[in-house]
Amino acid sequence: MAKRTPTRKTIKKADCPASLVWFDIPADDLSRAKKFYSSLFGWKIRRFPAMPDYWHIDTGGGKDTLDGGLLPRKYPQHPFTAYVSVPSVDKAAAKVAKLGGSICRAKTPVPGMGYFVICEDTEGNTFALWEMNPRAK
């Protein structure tokens, strides 16, 4: 029997690869960083509602591009962080640890939006896991 190629209807969510969905850029001088990125790329950078030290970066590319955030640098080597969408941050974080990575910041809610976990891979790179969940508190 020939192997059946999955169609859009038969592909389950678990079969889909994780996707980059957001990024954070830390800055020492937020005004300088806002001016740099808005002048360089034409990005619109506005304060994020209900988060006094966080600015939304609208990259202007529509639904098929990533938006991000601009925030104060928290520590000297605070890196640019990419967020990867996963069905469960709990399960993905456990897998990170099993594969030799580490958890830098435990599951954290973003009220009304979802949860994130900051991780470090086996090469010392930081990234975040993101679980969409409008019930997050």
Image (cartoon, rainbow, N blue to C red):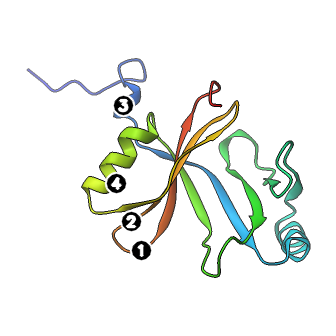
Dot 1 or dot 3, earlier in sequence: 3
Query: Would residue 56 be found to the left or right of residue 15 on screen?
Result: right
Q: Secondary structure at mark 4?
A: helix
In the image: residue 90, left or right of residue 1: right
Within 10 angstroms of label 3, few (less than 14), some, or many (20 or more) residues? few
The answer to whether the residue labelled 2 contacts the one labelled 1, judged by CB atoms less than 8 Å apart, is yes
**Which residue has dot 1 on it?**
124
Q: What amino acid is labelled 2 in the image?
A: Asp
> Which quadrant of the figure contains the N terminus?
top left
Residue tagged by mark 3?
A: 14
Q: Nearer the viewer, residue 3 or 69?
A: 69
Q: Earlier in the sequence, mark 3 or mark 2?
A: 3
Q: Is residue 51 above or below residue 88?
A: below
Q: CA distance from mark 1 to mark 3?
A: 27 Å
Instruction: Say whether marks 4 and 3 touch (CB < 8 Å).
Output: no
Are the residues tagged 1 and 4 within 8 Å (C-beta)? no
**Sequence-wise, which precedes: disc 2 or disc 4?**
4
Please report whichever mark, 4 or 3, sits nearer to the chain's N-terminal start: 3
In the rendered image, which residue does mark 4 sit on?
96
- Which of the two marks, 1 or 3, is nearer to us in this view? 1
Identity, as a three-letter code, of the amino acid under mark 4? Val
Place of residue 105 in the rendered image (x, y in percent of width and height, measured from the top left): 52, 56
Task: Check disc 3 and give the amino acid type.
Answer: Ala
Name the secondary structure under disc 3: helix
* Image marks 3 and 2: residues in contact by CB distance under 8 Å: no
